[in-house]
């Protein structure tokens, strides 16, 4: 293989990739933020279902889980 076939991106300073306006970077961040939002919605739904099933709020659910885990 010829060395010219490999194309690497230049080394960036720490955190520079999050502040530059490169098209590939904004698309990657868009996908990550979409995933984060969907996971947050699932977590909120799980908290609501847990409250419905146990009758305890989120702090109470954490207490129940800790008591179950530590016994």
Image: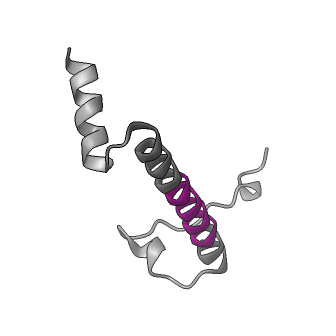
Left or right relative to 54: residue 29: right
Q: Quadrant of the C terminus?
A: top left
Snapshot quadrant of residue 62: top left
Residue 22, given in percent of the width and then of the height, sits at 60, 81
Q: Main secondary structure of the magenta part?
A: helix
Left or right relative to 24: residue 29: left
Note whether 6 is above or below 56 in the view shown. Answer: below
* Numbered range of the magenta stretch: 29-42
Q: Residue furthest front?
A: 55
Considering depth in this image, is 44 or 14 the residue closer to the camera? 44
The image's colour scheme reads: one colour
Considering depth in this image, is 12 or 64 the residue closer to the camera? 64
Snapshot quadrant of residue 41: bottom right
| Residue lying at 47% horizontally and 72% vertically, measured from the top left | 17
Residue 11, given in percent of the width and then of the height, sits at 47, 65
Residue 59, given in percent of the width and then of the height, sits at 25, 47
Note whether 71 is above or below 47 in the view shown. Answer: above
Membership of 31 in magenta stretch: yes
Membership of 56 in magenta stretch: no
Q: Quadrant of the N terminus?
A: top right
Q: Residue furthest bottom?
A: 21
Residue 5, given in percent of the width and then of the height, sits at 77, 56
Left or right relative to 26: residue 6: right
| Residue lying at 54% horizontally and 55% vertically, measured from the top left | 39
Left or right relative to 62: residue 37: right
Snapshot quadrant of residue 21: bottom right
| Residue lying at 50% horizontally and 46% vertically, measured from the top left | 49
């Amino acid at each position: 293989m010829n060395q010219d076939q490999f194309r690497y991106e230049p080394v960036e300073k720490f955190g520079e990739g999050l502040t530059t306006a490169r098209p590939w970077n904004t698309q990657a961040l868009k996908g990550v933020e979409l995933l984060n939002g969907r996971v947050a919605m699932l977590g909120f739904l799980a908290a609501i279902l847990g409250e419905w099933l146990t009758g305890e709020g989120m702090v109470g659910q954490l207490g129940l889980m800790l008591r179950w885990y530590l016994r």
